[in-house]
Amino acid sequence: MLASELAAAVEEFDPAVVVLVALPPGGMAHCRYLVSRLKAKCPAVHIVVGRWESGDEEVAEAADGVKGSDGVDRTLGGTTKRLADLLPVLSAAEDKEVKDGRAAPRPPAVGTVHA
């Protein structure tokens, strides 16, 4: 899937959080590009990057600091914890939108797209 197609899908789906996973070796340059494209199209979306690796120090250095993301996690457990930490913030924002009449409550949804 092209980056523009992924950005369009995210814009249409309008999720609160997008999780991008880049498995070694490589993939971080493409991941950084996707984060910048997604932030340009959907500035309010939270983006979590998973760089699940085996402990290679060179890979760990390359994964630090993806600009525009809410963080980079090196394990599935770390990504799960980051998502759990975001849940109260996202729930409060959705509740406020519903009370202000700006959005109707919607059921939770999960979308998976292979890039």
Image (cartoon, rainbow, N blue to C red):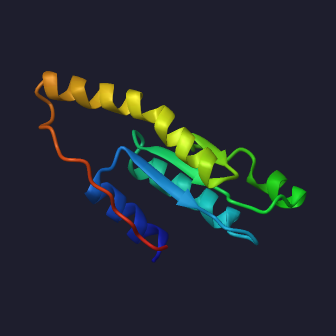
Could one spot residue 22 in this view of the protein?
A: yes
Q: Quadrant of residue 6?
A: bottom left
Left or right, 18 with reference to 34: left
Q: Which of the image's four quarters has the N terminus?
A: bottom left
Q: Residue at x 63, y 64 (%)?
A: 22
Q: Residue at x 53, y 58 (%)?
A: 20
- Give the x, y percent position of residue 46: 46, 42
- Give the x, y percent position of residue 64: 75, 47
Left or right, 92 with reference to 38: left
**Residue that extends furthest to the bottom in the rendered view of this protein:** 1
Q: Is residue 28 above or below residue 106?
A: below
- Give the x, y percent position of residue 97: 21, 28
Q: Give 37 or 112, whichever is nearer the viewer.
A: 112
- Give the x, y percent position of residue 28: 69, 62
Left or right, 10 with reference to 101: right
Q: Residue at x 61, y 54 (%)?
A: 76
Q: Quadrant of residue 44?
A: top left
The mark tally for this picture is: 0
Could one spot residue 67 in this view of the protein?
A: no
**Residue that extends furthest to the front in the rendered view of this protein:** 77
Q: Is residue 1 above or below residue 49?
A: below
